[in-house]
Image (cartoon, rainbow, N blue to C red):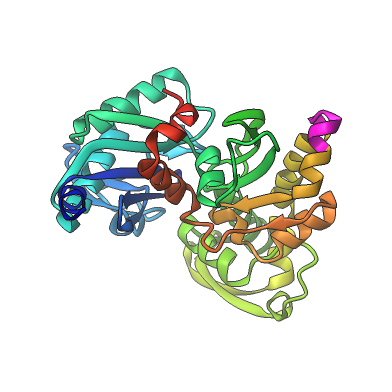
Amino acid sequence: MALTALKRFLRQDVALDLGTANTLIYLQGEGVVLNKPTVVAFDNEANVLSCGEEAKKFIGKNPPGINVVRPLKNGVIEDFDAVGLFLKTIVEAARRIRPVFSSRIVMCVPSQLTQVEKRTLLEAAQGAGFKRIFLLEEVMAAAIGAGLDISGHRPVMVVDIGGGTTEVAVISEMAYLFCRSRRIAGDEMDQALVRFLLEEYGLRIGPNTAEKVKWEIGSAQGCNDDIVNGMMEIAGQDVKGQVPASVQVSGLEIQRALSSAVEHIIASVQDCITALESQVRSEVEKRGILLTGGGSLLRNLGPLLSQRTGLPVKQPPSPLTTVVEGAGRTLSDFEYFSPAFVN
């Protein structure tokens, strides 16, 4: 037993969630060891200057001589070269935490990736030093991470709201009875706030500010939290005078600005329920919906979804890490979960 533990310590398998907004690394036996925004900054010669939080600070500022890239947008690879460099950089950062990784990695990917994009990720993982690479779709990983039985006959329903996509799936016997991805999620909420402040107040803000506003004062319809009636001062640039400016905005205004994105997400879930065969729908109605992903943390989104669908909605303890934790669980029982891998 001691020898087995020593081998596991020296050669740990890895799980990685490459998300539009954040990328997480999980080590077998240790859990999540790294969580970074999926952003990379280059100089004009394509040398990596920074990655993660440091690179994210440059978004919307356009500093001279620095190119800031989010390699994925709406769950789709936008910059193939940047994906490879980003992945290599964060793996090197994780290896500073734990020097020796196994050659096996389980990578979580959006369900709508093309074969070309999957091949790109496989090549990127090889470039980072991995030899045995397995792809697991994020919504499947989320179900595993939340402890749902994806191998049984009884279907389970998962709604995963990430940075770039909302994925809705019904899973039974490690296969999809229904799976659909929509490019409306956390990023679209941020963009809605950018548009609102520009149109209503003539204030230009960047995506980082919009994200901060969303978490500090944002909510879904029906929220009775005191924050809805509160005010927040938002700083940006006055578009007419091209000078720094700030405005006071209420929580109710922010809720209204987010409402379109929220309604589209709820409509995606309702469409899924309607499309199910009656027997499957009956099982889903009994068991309810698992709601996870960073976007699911918007205030009152879970209760609103439950109200609109008439189904119980449950959220895992840590929606931000559920996907990578699910991939991590497959490392411990690899043969059992092997039918769930897409390659």
| Residue bounds of the magenta highlight | 275-281
Q: Position of residue 235 (x, y in %)?
A: 51, 71
The percent coordinates of residue 136 (x first, y second) are 45, 34
* Residue 75 magenta: no
Question: In the figure, 125 relative to 284: above or below?
Answer: above
Which quarter of the figure has residue 83? Answer: top left
Task: Give 59 or 113, whichever is nearer the viewer.
Answer: 113
Q: Residue 297's image quarter?
A: bottom right
Up the image or down, 247 lies above or below 237; here it is below
Asked if one can make out residue 70 in the rendered structure from this viewpoint, the answer is: no
What residue is shown at x 20% (from left), y 40% (from top)? 102
Toward the viewer: 196 or 119? 119
Q: In the rendering, at what x and y percent does residue 145 appear? A: 50, 50
Q: Is residue 252 left or right of residue 158?
A: right
Q: Quadrant of the C terminus?
A: top left
Residue 72 visible from this viewpoint: yes
Residue at image coords 43%, 38%:
108
